[in-house]
Amino acid sequence: MSTEPMQQEGYDFMAAAFAVYNELGNGYTEDVYQEALELELTERAMPFQSQAELTICYRGRPLRRRFRPDLVVCEGLVVELKAVAALAPEHEAQVLNYLKATGKPVGYLVNFGHREKLEWKRFARTRKISVNERKSAV
């Protein structure tokens, strides 16, 4: 049995992302991929929230400014979608900030815009604010 948080949910989510990429390929805008992924998640009976508003707290007080990740899947996976030629450090920082702000255990950064493959990275919280990263591209 794995000790990685949300492992099966992550596998299931990535299977849905690969299904979308295999059907559409690259070249569309992020919102097209998000809509297709939402349809795929619905067909797979995977619960999700789209553009869920996440509260950020400073010294225990909520700020007016909010985060809105593209998806929160199975209540524990924070997902940021991109459709760019290559992922940048700012994209990774965005996911890491979502994890810090929400306390969710796992984040995925998924790029449908890479020319040759679906590009993705998985981030997992291991302690209060530290985050481990696993990179992969298939």
Image (cartoon, rainbow, N blue to C red):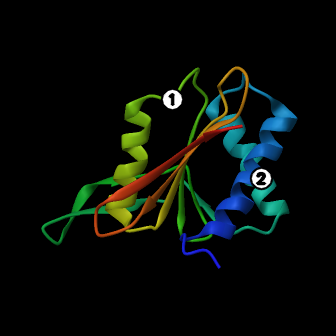
- The number of numbered discs placed on residues in the rendered structure image is 2
C-alpha gap between disc 2 and disc 1 = 20 Å
**Circle 1 residue:** 87
Q: Quadrant of residue 64?
A: bottom left
Q: Residue at x 46, y 67 (%)?
A: 105
In terms of secondary structure, where does tag 2 sit? helix
Q: Residues within 10 Å of mark 1 (few under 14, many from 20)?
A: some
In the rendering, at what x and y percent does residue 54 appear? 40, 61
**Circle 2 residue:** 16
Residues 15 and 40: in front is: 15
Q: Residues within 10 Å of mark 2 (few under 14, many from 20)?
A: many
In the rendered structure, are the residues bearing label 2 and label 1 in contact, judged by CB atoms less than 8 Å apart? no
Q: Quadrant of the C terminus?
A: top right
Identify residue type, mark 2: Ala
Is residue 3 positioned above or below 133 on the image?
A: below
Q: Residue at x 82, y 32 (%)?
A: 24
Q: Quadrant of the N terminus?
A: bottom right
